[in-house]
Amino acid sequence: MHNLEKKLVDFLEAGTNPSLAMIGGIDVLNNVIPEIGVSPLLPEFVRIVINSDESIESEDGWRFICGTLSICKNGIAMRECVDLLDQFISLDSKADDQILESYLNIAIDKTNESLARAATLDGALRIAIVLPEKRFDLIRVLIRIDVRDSPDFLRWAAKIIGVAHSHWHVDELVNKLHELRDVADAKDEVYFELGMSCLSKALTSIESNAVAAELQDARFWFNKSLASPLGRPDSTLFLLCTEVLTEFSVGELNGSVESLANQIDNSVRDLIISHRSKFDPPWLRARTFEVLLWEQLSQALRGLENELLEPSWYEPAVVIEQFLLPIYSASRTILKLNQLGGIESLVRPRIEGSLAAVAGQAHLMRKWFCQNQFSEIANDAKHLLEQADKLVSKYSDDQILFGKQSNGLIESLITNSNLTANHKSLIINAIYDAFEVHMTNLTNAETMVIETCLLAVASQSDYHKSKDSKQLFNAILLWTITFLHARLEMTVRDEPAIAYLFKRADGNLAKEDDLQSDYKKFMESNVAGTKIEVMNVGGGRADVYFQFSAERIVVEVKRDSKDCSFDALEKAYSSQAMDYQNISARLGFLLVLDQTDRDGAAMHISELVKSVELIRKGETQPRFLVIIKVPGERLRPSEQTKLAKKKG
């Protein structure tokens, strides 16, 4: 222990807070920077220097601070120094530059303790948030972080990268998060920050279908982060709050209000008690504040949901001032953002549709506006009434179905058509009803198969980044699973065209083109607006080609009578199936007619679908393939009974 350290210990043990002069002055400290910089007592020396008005305003004082920081290896000492120096950000631009440079140099030096590196990355973020012009140096370091670095450091780095993206929306930061997805100790943090990046995009979007898509992606990543054994009440809260928002926007919140309310309350308690403290860095406290604002939004939505179901309001001023108008401009009034955007695109159609359809609500809203024209929220009330009036003038009462007519995802399908307003409304409702019937009729087994594939493909880069590829893949997946379900249920008596799935009297096996023809006809009737073609039938390759916008996906159709295990199919056909992905999205399907001996029986749908991800030699990005087996060589029920009796 150096003499100065001993002297400092003596002062502290005596209960004395020494001044700079009592330990020899700043010149003495600058002469022993190498010794003090590696001392666990460094924070106490830094505290003495920054409490000295004369020293903190001089170059000598900052030379000591930056010099000792640059050689500090102790993570705990470094974290305390970062907290001490936080109060001086922006007081001296030259000092800011020196501290930031020291922080970043320490962060990129892999010989330092992970905790020390994480602490300086935290310090650099604090400087960049207060002084945005400094952000570029930080971002440069963040996007160069090596995925092979220490897992402890990468966990903190993932959090810093996510917070940095929420401030500056740099796409390269999200790309870096995707690179870090496979770091075991950092996965839940990476997934959470990917969810936050999607949530951020949702808040700044203005189209309701884009908002809904981003919220869906956010929920996917939040769900993945919940696998952490430590628990993620922040992920749970965002999941629940976005669920409240989504269900409110389509008029489906009422049935789950109480259940969601209890879950949200429990998650808030867990977050505050177990995961947050007064010692958190400022940006983490801001994150806590953000999630609590979302909790307030969900509470308000739950309150308004009940009121929108009423023909009139017992206390209209309370409903309008505490729920309706704050939610109508929730981005600004509740989430404290500087602009309106994604939230409004979801909640406003529901609110406007309700006032247009329920005369009692509209009357109370007008009465409130007349009495409160000088209120801060009067402009929002005026805008709401104007939009409700427009709906009334366009649609008859039975067409103002706010849960359906204003659903952004459905409405966006025909927004640019040349139909009249009334015809658009009818078609929107028809499409909504058709999809509702289809989704309701999906069995649990079908749903699980589809969900498993979607979870597997969600992180694939082409699927994640290309909206057209994602939509085309989702459509093919949904309707191909529906095709498989139908072929498992139907018999030749139901549809003679599926005779190829059953054993023939002459013992000959069906060809690939039988399955191809059946599949193509089915898909043409369901995937509307998509170019579908058959390819290379005469050359022995039976494939179905789907094109949507500039993207294409090919379903390779095969038959196999020897080994239809997924491992065998992957080995035999995946390379050929993936050849179609060379100039388009690296997404594809392999549809196989299973003609192996199964005693004429079909199989459960959950045993017939598997997704695989492969990286070809010389490539860095994985290719994604869904393998689907269609059981062939089946026996009719009566024939199965005869076979069973024969075996018995």
Image: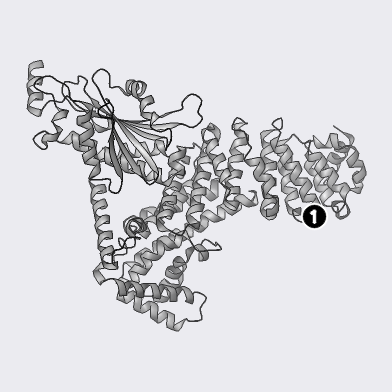
Relative to 83, say whether 399 is above or below.
below
Which residue is nearer to you in this view: 196 or 334? 196
Q: Residue 256 occupies which quadrant of the picture?
A: bottom left
Q: How is the image coloured?
A: one colour
Residue at the spot 24% in from the left edge and 55% down from the top edge:
433
Relative to 541, say whether 385 is above or below.
below
Relative to 214, say whether 186 is above or below.
above
Residue 122 at least partly seen: no
Q: How many marks?
A: 1
Label 1 element class: loop
Residue at the spot 13% in from the left edge and 30% down from the top edge:
499
Residue at the spot 26% in from the left edge and 67% down from the top edge:
422
Indicate left or right for 68 with 115 as reference.
right
Indicate left or right for 52 with 199 as reference.
right
Which residue is nearer to you in this view: 498 or 437? 498
Residue 448 % position (x, y): 31, 38
Residue 647 % position (x, y): 10, 16
Residue 371 at least partly seen: yes
Q: Residue 356 occupies which quadrant of the picture?
A: bottom left
- Residue on which disc 1 sits: 92
Q: Label 1 crowding class (10 Å Cα cut-off): few <14, some 14-19, many 20+?
A: few
Q: Quadrant of the N terminus?
A: top right
Q: Quadrant of the C terminus?
A: top left
User: Which residue extends farthest top?
Assistant: 647
Which residue is nearer to you in this view: 337 or 51? 337
Relative to 440, say whether 118 is above or below.
above
Indicate left or right for 118 with 308 as reference.
right
User: Which residue extends farthest front?
Assistant: 538
